[in-house]
């Protein structure tokens, strides 16, 4: 047992699975998904969806998603869920409008969110439960 008077964290141990997120409700949903027969991918996506609601400023549906996944000792696969540029953001647009620098606060610096597409792709490749089921708690 850890002395709680000193900084640090207690050990976390599990024999059938575990989850950790930045918010208790997301962690609770991840564990619930595991108990329903979902795998780690299902749990991670469900937790991310809940985090989109409870911590929208820090994570979620309006952002990007990057993952490196190795299932059952297989070779790791990386997923790049970074958003794409809007359709009209072509080089000619910027040249014709004499835009040679894009500031961080410019509307031109924003991409189309890629998280949901990444979740869908990752789930199609590795998920176990129905994709829609992973959104129920957040809705």
Image (cartoon, grey):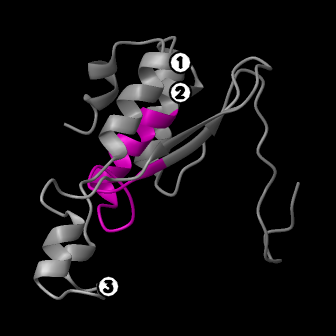
Mark 3 lies on a secondary structure that is: loop
Location of residue 75 by image quarter: top right
Q: How far is the residue under mark 1 from the one under mark 2? A: 7 Å
Q: Going 31% across and 68% down the picture, which residue do you hit?
A: 57
Q: How far is the residue under mark 3 from the one under mark 1? A: 35 Å
Where is residue 34? Give x, y as percent.
54, 21
Q: Can you say whether 103 is above or below 83 in the image?
A: below
Residue 89 forms part of the magenta stretch: no
Mark 1 neighbour density, 10 Å: few (under 14) some (14–19) many (20 or more): some
Mark 2 neighbour density, 10 Å: few (under 14) some (14–19) many (20 or more): many
What quarter of the picture does the C terminus occupy?
A: top left
Mark 1 lies on a secondary structure that is: helix
Mark 2 lies on a secondary structure that is: helix
Q: Are marks 1 and 2 in contact (CB under 8 Å)?
A: yes
Q: Nearer the viewer, mark 3 or mark 2?
A: 3
Residue beneath label 1, please? 126
Mark 3 neighbour density, 10 Å: few (under 14) some (14–19) many (20 or more): few
- Mark earlier in primary sequence (3, 2): 2
Where is residue 32? Give x, y as percent.
46, 26
Residue 129 visible (yes or no): yes
Q: How far is the residue under mark 3 from the one under mark 2? A: 33 Å
Q: Does residue 68 appear left or right of residue 139 in this picture?
A: right
Residue beneath label 3, please? 104
Residue beneath label 2, please? 41
- Point out which mark residue 38 bears: none
- Mark earlier in primary sequence (1, 2): 2
Q: Does residue 88 appear left or right of residue 128 in this picture?
A: left
Where is residue 118? Give x, y as percent.
40, 37
What is the magenta range? 44-65
Location of residue 85 by image quarter: bottom left
Q: Going 26% across and 55% down the picture, which residue do you hit?
A: 62
- Mark earlier in primary sequence (3, 1): 3
């Amino acid at each position: 047992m850890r002395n709680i008077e000193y900084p640090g964290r207690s050990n976390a141990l599990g024999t059938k699975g575990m989850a950790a997120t930045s918010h208790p409700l997301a962690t609770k949903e991840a564990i619930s998904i595991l108990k329903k027969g979902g795998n780690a991918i299902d749990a991670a996506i469900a937790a991310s969806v809940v985090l989109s609601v409870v911590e929208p400023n820090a994570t979620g549906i309006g952002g990007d998603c990057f993952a490196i996944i190795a299932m059952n000792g297989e070779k790791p696969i990386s997923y790049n869920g970074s958003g794409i540029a809007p359709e009209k953001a072509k080089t000619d647009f910027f040249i014709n409008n004499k835009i040679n620098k894009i500031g961080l606060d410019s509307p031109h610096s924003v991409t189309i969110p890629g998280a949901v597409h990444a979740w869908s792709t990752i789930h199609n490749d590795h998920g176990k439960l129905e994709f829609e089921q992973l959104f129920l708690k957040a809705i």
